[in-house]
Image (cartoon, rainbow, N blue to C red):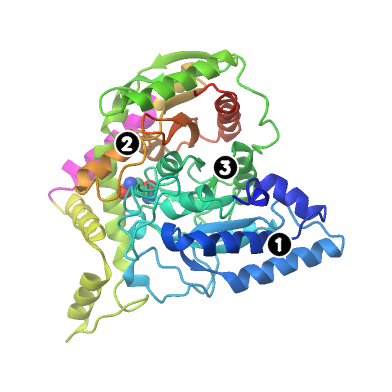
Amino acid sequence: MSDVLKSAAKLAEAVRSGETSAADALAASSSLIADRDDEIHAFLHLTTERAQAQAAAVDAKIAAGEDAGPLAGVPIALKDNMCTRGAPTTCSSKILDGWHPPYDATVVDRLEAAGAIVVGKTNLDEFAMGSSTENSAFGPTRNPLDTSRVPGGSSGGSAAAVAAGYVPLSLGSDTGGSIRQPAALCGVVGVKPTYGAVSRYGLIAFASSLDQIGPFAHTVEDAALCFDVVSGHDRLDATSIPEPLAPTLTNLHDGVDGMRIGIIDELMGDGIEPDVRRRTEQAAEALAAAGAIVDTVSVPATIYGLAAYYLIAPAEASSNLARYDGVRYGQRVDGANVATMNTNTRSAGFGDEVKRRIMLGTYALSSGYYDAYYGKAQRVRTLISNEFAAAYENFDLLLSPTSPSTAFELGAKSDPMSLYMCDVCTIPSNLAGHPAMSVPFGVGDDGLPVGVQVLAPMLQEPRMFRAAQVLENAAASGGAA
Ligand code: GLN
């Protein structure tokens, strides 16, 4: 990996001080992508012209003695479900092939205002539905640490772009685990913020009550830096939290002395690989060694999260995806009348998993079944929120594995259910709207990275990042050996 691209914080400092330039950082990133991305396929499109113009603007600001921002000259990759003006935004779906949004997502505006350089758009499972990035209409992404394995999903391209060292930062979206699970499988940090902390304006909707944008990085510090840049109120998103958010960088190194941390009992049992469980226990020991008071805690409804999610998320998706009708966006396959044109377009444009979700969601919402499926799932969602609230009366943070296993082989999980199971530990936080993040903590029996999940109450990102920093330090000093 080119050294300059290892740390966003250090790179921005070097660019601001004139030690290196934004143009040089971009050139280093572009050459790494050119060398290796034919094999990894983290990117669907590069935004080279825009990146060069932005890098030149950053360098000009610095030459003029102006402040070029906290991410000055830092190359960043965006999951291809975030709108970028004039550049393709496909959601890895044929139905949006050729569509160029007329506006930028709020996160793009904020990143560029902070001096970051958007280098390209990354691969994902179609419409963010999946856990391996194998559901992309444009071919899978490979895990840079072992190319026979998946990078996780659905933000697999963004996780791989950081893990491959192309960029120090990327953004993904997380509806049920799509930032944290690929972060775990690729050995990088991944953050799912509090619902409403980061604007969803310009994020193409999958399940609007669950979707959140968040960063991938090599270090907890870089993830905190990026989160502080992209988060905060946006009047263009009605679900954006209006209050100012506490910065996460300020107290990042304050440690966990005296914090009460609970290991979620139900997420440490059956279905979790023993090596992953062992690393999670070691992570808990590392937190205890740093002064935290660690205990186990029961949050029984978490095990129903998966079932509730696979009704709520498809229900919302079936509504959100109704807009792809061959009229307003992207592809059209003609037919004798409008209804046939709609059918032809959607039959040709959507992949199998997307169709499966639309059918599941339509069924769950249909009259006669609504109460038994969608209504019941919403009650489970409330139950999970209530149980988390009860757990947080006694604990400041919770801990669990991020993913039940390390990265698996491409093609190894072909039935939908086995892929759905990948999100058993991550889904509960989405349902509750709480923040959670994955931190690399050692490797599994196969030598591939294990991620440990730190969960926090609503808006307690600063506390969550502090614990994550302790885990990163412990892993670096042999605590995960
Ligand atoms: N893997 C989950 C799904 O397929 C979560 C996806 C996500 O978080 N976008 O729905």
Look at the numbered disc 1 and say if its residue's Cβ is closer than 8 Å to ligand 1.
no
Residue 372: say if magenta: yes
N-terminal of the pair, mark 1 or mark 3, is 1
Query: Real-space Cα distance between discs 2 and 1?
Result: 48 Å
Q: Judge left or right: residue 423 versus residue 237.
A: left
Q: Residue most toward the left? A: 368
Q: Amino acid at mark 3?
A: His
Q: Which residue is mark 2?
A: 381
- Residue 158 at x, y percent in the picture: 48, 53
Query: Real-space Cα distance between discs 1 and 3?
Result: 20 Å
Q: Residue at x 30, y 23 (%)?
A: 300
Query: Do the residues bearing badges 1 and 3 touch, measured as CB atoms within 8 Å?
Result: no
Residue 249: say if magenta: no
- Give the mark toward the camera: 1 or 3: 1
Residue 218 circle label:
3
Q: Amino acid at mark 2?
A: Arg
Query: Real-space Cα distance between discs 2 and 3?
Result: 32 Å
- Residue 267 at x, y percent in the picture: 33, 26
Look at the numbered disc 2 and say if its residue's Cβ is closer than 8 Å to ligand 1.
no
Q: Which residue is mark 1?
A: 24
Q: Residue most toward the bottom? A: 336
- Residue 232 at x, y percent in the picture: 61, 48
- Residue 130 at x, y percent in the picture: 31, 51
Q: Residue at x 35, y 56 (%)?
A: 125
